[in-house]
């Protein structure tokens, strides 16, 4: 009797994402306003960079999936489309369940609030109430290991302290889908090992995990399935044991890296 696959957690259907920028930056307020009007009316004096083109994927509940590829291949863009930071230019994204995104740790923190108060703020951003955050607070604080510094405003935190707190909040709330973008490279070796162990524990409990990394060893060791992106699309989707060759080939393929001045295309 054939085994049925678990239900989909994330579905990408013919997904595309492009970014647009002006060929030249305006040098005055008048030029900026004229360019803005032309941009809104569809004026062609702007360039377009396609980061993702016609990507269709299904990630099933409980999978541990790695995403690899050279810089500019669209790895982080896919994660930002999944958690609605970006809107797709083409195609659709369907997500079945709440997401805990570990993409830019500390991005949802208010600098003037203490670490303790930011736990409640971050939980609310992720869609969880104050009561649940308070219930999980002892585990969050123990994992973060910030001691009395938890009562300091986070504007005084180092990047490592922000990473500890952000990771702890995201992984101790019951979101069924975890998105991890190179975040396991943050912090000292002991904290990295602690993070990896936590992610593996969550996966063993049935969570869906998507890990973006350039570390082929980490991807091969932790992930069951690997997706390699190259030239705006998927060049490999299969077992982690066979992903190394495809990833190394992708590094030799040129990709377009959108400059930081690009705006979202639509």
Image (cartoon, rainbow, N blue to C red):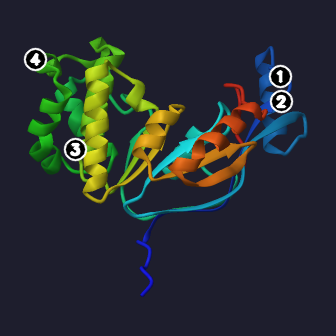
Residue 153 picture quarter: top left
Residue 58 horizontal/vertical position (percent): 54, 63
Find disc 4 in the rendering and name its residue.
148
* 241 sits left or right of 184 in the view: right
Disc 1 + disc 4, Cβ < 8 Å: no
Pointer 3 or 2: first along the chain:
2
Disc 4 + disc 3, Cβ < 8 Å: no
Disc 1 + disc 2, Cβ < 8 Å: yes
| Image depth: mark 1 or mark 4 in front | 4
Q: Nearer the viewer, residue 155 or 216?
A: 216
Screen quadrant of the N terminus = bottom left
Label 4 CA crowd tier, 10 Å (few <14, some 14–19, many 20+): few
* 80 sits left or right of 139 in the view: right
| Image depth: mark 3 or mark 1 in front | 3
Which residue extends farthest bottom? 1
Q: CA distance from mark 3 to mark 1?
A: 49 Å
Q: CA distance from mark 2 to mark 4?
A: 53 Å
The residue shown at (10%, 17%) is 148
Q: CA distance from mark 4 to mark 3?
A: 20 Å
Q: CA distance from mark 1 to mark 4?
A: 52 Å
Find disc 2 in the rendering and name its residue.
34
Residue 189 horizontal/vertical position (percent): 31, 20
The residue shown at (33%, 44%) is 125
Q: CA distance from mark 1 to mark 2?
A: 5 Å
Find disc 3 in the rendering and name its residue.
172
The residue shown at (31%, 43%) is 199
Label 3 CA crowd tier, 10 Å (few <14, some 14–19, many 20+): some
Q: Secondary structure at mark 1?
A: helix
The residue shown at (73%, 45%) is 232
Find disc 1 in the rendering and name its residue.
31
């Amino acid at each position: 009797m054939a085994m049925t696959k678990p239900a989909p957690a994330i579905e990408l259907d013919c997904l595309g994402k492009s970014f647009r920028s002006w060929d030249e930056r305006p040098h005055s307020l008048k030029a900026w306003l004229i360019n803005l009007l032309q941009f809104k009316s569809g004026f062609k004096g702007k360039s377009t960079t396609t980061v993702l083109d016609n990507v269709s994927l299904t990630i099933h509940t409980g999978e541990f999936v790695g995403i690899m590829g050279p810089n500019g291949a669209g790895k982080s863009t896919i994660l930002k489309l999944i958690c609605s930071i970006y809107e797709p230019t083409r195609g659709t994204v369907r997500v079945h369940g709440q997401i805990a995104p570990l993409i830019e740790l500390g991005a949802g923190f208010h600098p003037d609030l203490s670490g303790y108060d930011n736990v409640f703020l971050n939980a609310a951003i992720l869609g969880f109430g104050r009561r649940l955050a308070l219930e999980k607070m002892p585990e969050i604080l123990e994992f973060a290991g910030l001691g009395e510094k938890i009562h300091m405003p986070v504007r005084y935190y180092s990047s490592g302290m922000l990473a500890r707190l952000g990771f702890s909040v995201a992984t101790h709330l019951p979101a069924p889908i975890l998105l991890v973008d190179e975040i396991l490279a943050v912090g000292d070796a002991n904290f990295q090992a602690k993070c990896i162990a936590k992610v593996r524990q969550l996966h063993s409990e049935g969570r869906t995990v998507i890990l973006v990394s350039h570390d082929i060893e980490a991807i091969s060791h932790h992930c069951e399935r690997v997706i390699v992106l190259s030239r705006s699309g998927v060049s490999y989707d299969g077992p982690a044991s066979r992903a190394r060759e495809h990833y190394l080939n992708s590094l030799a393929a040129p990709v377009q890296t959108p400059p930081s001045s690009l705006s979202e295309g639509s």
